[in-house]
Structures are given as structure tokens and as C-alpha cells.
Image (cartoon, helix red, strand yellow):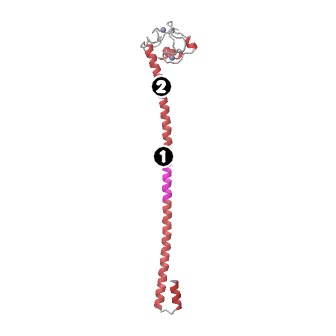
Amino acid sequence: MRAQQQEAAAEPLDDELLAVIAASEHAAREEAERSAERDREAAREEEEFAAVLAMSLQCANQEAHQEAANDEEDDEMRQIMEASLAAAQEEEERRRVDQRIAELTIGHHQSTAAPATEADTDECCPLCMEDLDESELAFTPCPCGYHLCSFCYGKIRNDITGAGAGLCPGCRKEYKD
Ligand SMILES: [Zn+2]
Ligand SMILES: [Zn+2]
């Protein structure tokens, strides 16, 4: 374009040609402006797109955090479940001992209930299977000589009700103080 202009300046040109050149220069300027406007618009769109992208990334992060929080809640829930399970097992163990005391004290296992004379070492309580300590081995609450631990003795005398309550599991006679 500039080359043309120089040529135009160098040679004598008629008005028509000058007008054409002027018009084409004008068109070129307009085209340049339009192109600059397009660039600005493109830049704006790019910015908007970047903003949208940033926002959606933020959303994704928040969701990730939310999920992490949910995982923590799951952990807490699992701990609570485990704790209550452990409590239930303990309760079940206690019930089992109670059940065994009830069975023995109402005489189901009378024949297998070891009399005190059978063994004097490593003897355990026939009800809860805990080892008897020395004072418990010396403890014969019933004249029949039936040994049991102080815990089970206390249970029979104070805790259980119904058949077998307060009775010696060995001879089924009532315990006397
Ligand atoms: Zn016992
Ligand atoms: Zn007895």
C-alpha cells in the first residue's frame, strides 16, 4: 500500500486514481480497526472463559473438600459402630456368664460340677472359668465344699433372680451366711 502511495507520489495521477487510493486506505484503516476490535473481543472472551474455568475448578475443589468431609464423617460413624459393637460383645459375654450361672445353679451340670476335693491346684471357677486365687480357694461358702469365685458367688446371692437364685450350684442348697 505504501509502495503504491510512493509510486502515486512519483508519477502524476489523475483524481480518480487518488480517490481510489484514498478509499482503499480508508477501507484498510477500517479493516484494521475492526480487526483490533475483534482482537479485543477475543481477549475478553478468553478472560471470561478463564473466569468460568476458574469458577468450575473452584466448584470441583469444593466438591472434593465436601467428599473429604464426608469421608471423615464415615470414619466417625465407623468408630461409633465399632465402639457399640465392642459394647455389645461385652454385654454378650456378661450374658453368657449369667446364662452359665443360671444353668449350673438350676442343676443342669450338677454331675460335672467339680467338688472341692477333686483338685487343689490351678482350679478355676466352674461358672466363669476364671482362675481362683488363694483366698477364693480357701473360700467355701457351702458345707458341700463347692468352690467358685467371689464374683460368681456375689452374682448368685445378689444379682440373679428366679430358679437357682441364692443356691449353691454344687448341692442346690441355699447359701447360709
Ligand atoms: Zn466365677
Ligand atoms: Zn453346696
**Residue 89, relative to residue 11: is it above or below?**
above
Q: Which residues are magenta?
A: 52-70
Q: Does the CB distance between marks 2 and 1 fall below 8 Å?
A: no
State the SS at label 2: helix
Badge 2: residue crowd in 10 Å (few <14, some 14–19, many ≥20): few
Question: Between residues 101 and 10, which one lies in front from this camera angle?
Answer: 10
Residue corresponding to mark 2: 91
Badge 1: residue crowd in 10 Å (few <14, some 14–19, many ≥20): few
Question: Between residues 163 and 112, which one lies in front from this camera angle?
Answer: 112
Residue corresponding to mark 1: 67
Which sits earlier in the primary sequence, circle 2 or circle 1? Answer: 1
Q: Amino acid at mark 2?
A: Glu
Report if residue 43 lies within the magenta region: no
Please state the horizontal and vertical placement of residue 176, each as a whole percent of the image: 51, 8
Residue 46 seen in render: yes
Image check: 106 left or right of 65? left
Between the C-alphas of marks 2 and 1, the distance is 35 Å
Which secondary structure type mostly characterizes the magenta part of the structure? helix
Q: Residue at x 50, y 51 (%)?
A: 61
Q: Residue furthest left?
A: 108
Question: Between residues 110 and 161, which one lies in front from this camera angle?
Answer: 110
Report if residue 63 lies within the magenta region: yes
Please state the horizontal and vertical placement of residue 83, each as a whole percent of the image: 50, 32
Q: Amino acid at mark 1?
A: Glu
Q: Residue furthest right?
A: 134
